[in-house]
Image: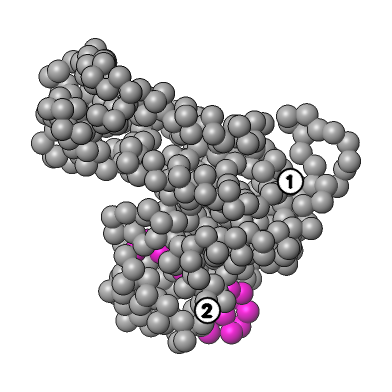
Amino acid sequence: MDRRSFLKTSAAAAAATGLAACAPKETKSSNNNEISGDVPQHYPGIGLLGYGCMRWPMTTGEDGKDVIDQEAVNALVDKALEHGVNYFDTSPVYLRGDSERATAVALNRHPREKWLLATKLSNFSNSTYENSVLMYRRSLEIFQTDHIDYYLLHSIGSADDFKKRFGDTGIMDFLLKEKAAGHIRHLGFSIHSHQEGFDSMMELHEKYHWDFVQIQMNYIDWTHAGGRDTNAEYMYNELAKRDIPVVIMEPLRGGGLATLPKNQVEKLKAIEPDSSVASWAFRFAGSFPKVLTVLSGMTYMEHLEDNLKTYCNFKPLNESEFALLEEIAEDRTKFPLVGCTGCQYCMPCPYGINIPGVFRFYDNSVIEGTYVTGPEQQHYARARRKYLAEYDKAVESMRQADHCIRCGKCMKSCPQHIRIPSELGRIDQYIEQIRQDKL
């Protein structure tokens, strides 16, 4: 089946299967802060929008250090449950180990049958059988429950990674016994891998009978994943072929799809003037019938409310909208945003580079549409001169990207996990091509 036919079929199926749960509870009109109805369900009893609990809101504790804002977490969980968001995804390693605790405190204020727990065997640093069993039992203890609804082998990177952490340790036999006893209701894995690694996990399906798989899927990674990552189109098709439900992570691709260049935003607003840019990414993710739930790390109430507006009134993408997002994806791969938040954690650079300044200039030029595309561009010579002049104005020459020696010190401190040396190199190469008129 070609991609166009596949998307058309998927969207039609999504519209026909399980979207009745969108029906509003109330008929009164709502203002910007009012949301009525529940999120839809592709699978009975599971809200299509799921809660990713990796980035709970923080506050300052009595000792002056950052701590999870439990009151805010409670309010977010209450709001989510009120509208049918009942799948909560966490891990023993999120937020320095505190995510499970904060999530448990919020959820245990509600009856156990009202929420679904997804947590992980995150045995990266110590994959011994004993430590893995201890990590599993600790999760049960923290949540004061006798079962985990969705248990994941966390972030498989390759066949060797699976073998080292799970296959050769004996832990899989233990997990299968726990599943048989009802303490694990569904067993699956999350994966960031090249195609060979993904295929190796599919080969193990006959042995382990994966109940679900969590993949990175958004309209960029659908066919433009790049690097060592596998295209989401391929993974989704392989999972659908085996009738394995899909949990989606990174629907916003690390937040990058919440901000688009001005010309692309205008195209989306022309169709849905009252919808956020982010809502298009969530509609894309929710338009596929084999999707169990779409995870979103909703740190603040406005994030949750925006996603609830999208899903409580869910409209699967039509064929022309899929085509528009594919067009945007192709443009984004040519000029991808860095996504730097300007937090300054990477500074000072030992070689004097103004890392946030370089990233800010580049991202702003893409967002505002002032970047240089090539000789075919209207007023190309003028745009080229202006771009170089503005770069020199924004970042003094001795602090520009060309001075990076790729020492890597900056990467250790980046909370966004940006590959800073690579991004600086990419931007420097682009600017050097403009300087030499070789675009």
Measured as percent of width and height from the top left, residue 116 is found at 65, 62
Locate the C terminus and report the quarter of the image it occupies: top left
**Residue 358 at least partly seen:** yes
Extreme residue toward the right, this view: 27
**Residue 46 at least partly seen:** no
Q: Which residue is mark 2?
A: 242
Q: How far apart in space, not on screen, are marks 1 and 2 (Cα)?
A: 30 Å
**Are the two marked residues, 1 and 2, in contact with CB atoms closer than 8 angstroms?**
no
**Residue drawn at point x = 47 percent, y = 56 percent:** 217
Question: Neighbour class for label 1 at 10 Å: few (<14), some, many (≥20)?
Answer: some
Say which element carries label 2: loop
| Amino acid on which the number 1 mark rests in the picture | Asn
Looking at the rendering, the stretch of residues picked out in magenta corresponds to: 177-193
Would you identify the image quadrant in which residue 112 lies? bottom right
Say which element carries label 1: loop
In the picture, the disc for residue 96 is none
Measured as percent of width and height from the top left, residue 326 is found at 47, 48
Q: Is residue 44 left or right of residue 250?
A: right
**Residue drawn at point x = 64 percent, y = 31 percent:** 273
The colour mode here is one colour
Q: Earlier in the sequence, mark 1 or mark 2?
A: 2
**Residue drawn at point x = 88 percent, y = 36 percent:** 28
Q: State whether residue 431 is above or below residue 333.
A: above
| Amino acid on which the number 2 mark rests in the picture | Arg
Which residue occupies the foreground of this view, 25 or 90? 25
**Residue drawn at point x = 67 percent, y = 61 percent:** 12
Q: State whether residue 151 is above or below residue 167.
A: above
- Determine if the magenta segment contains residue 150: no
Q: State whether residue 198 is above or below residue 114.
A: below
In the picture, the disc for residue 313 is 1
